[in-house]
Amino acid sequence: MDYVVYVIVRIVQVLLYIVDIAMLVRAVLSLFMLSDDNPLAMLAYSITEPFIMPIRALFDKLGWFEGVPIDMPFLITCMIIMTASMLL
């Protein structure tokens, strides 16, 4: 039983690491003027957006951080993913 839990935890850690790297790639690519059909940008967007969208929807619903020039849902999602990685 302990081995099964260990394998599940390791799989979740690897998936969180992949999402963390994709978040970093997305942040770096946002600094450059890339076209919408760039394959790397599309890959980073498709990996990270399912994690960012619920936070973004919650902030929009509650009206938090309106008018702030920083993408706060992105930052909060990064912190949640990093915290989850450290707790595992």
Image (spheres, rainbow, N blue to C red):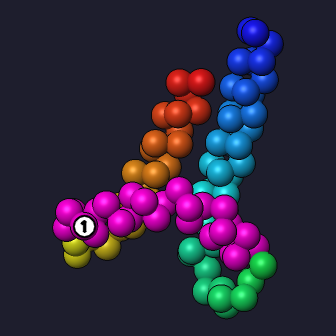
Along the line of sight, the residue nearer the viewer: 27 or 48: 48
The residue wearing badge 1 is 61
Instruction: Tell me which amino acid carries mark 1.
Output: Lys
The quadrant of the rendering that contains the C terminus is top right
Query: Residue 71 occupies which quadrant of the picture?
Result: bottom left
Q: Residues within 10 Å of mark 1 (few under 14, many from 20)?
A: few
What's the magenta region?
A: 40-65
Tell me: 60 left or right of 53: left
Tell me which secondary structure the magenta stretch mostly adopts. helix
Whole-percent x and y of residue 78?
49, 49
Whole-percent x and y of residue 28?
61, 66
Q: Secondary structure at mark 1?
A: helix
Name the residue furthest top.
Answer: 2
- Answer yes or no: is residue 65 visible: no
Tell me: 86 left or right of 22: left
Query: Residue 10 occupies which quadrant of the picture?
Result: top right
Please tell me whether residue 78 is drawn above or below residue 7 in the rendered image: below
Along the line of sight, the residue nearer the viewer: 17 or 63: 63
Along the line of sight, the residue nearer the viewer: 11 or 65: 11
Whole-percent x and y of residue 86?
55, 27
Name the residue: 77% across, 18% down.
Answer: 4
Name the residue furthest left.
Answer: 63
Query: Residue 38 occupies which quadrant of the picture?
Result: bottom right
Residue 63 belongs to magenta span: yes
Please tell me whether residue 34 is drawn above or below residue 51 in the rendered image: below
Name the residue: 49% across, 34% down.
Answer: 83
Whole-percent x and y of residue 39?
78, 79
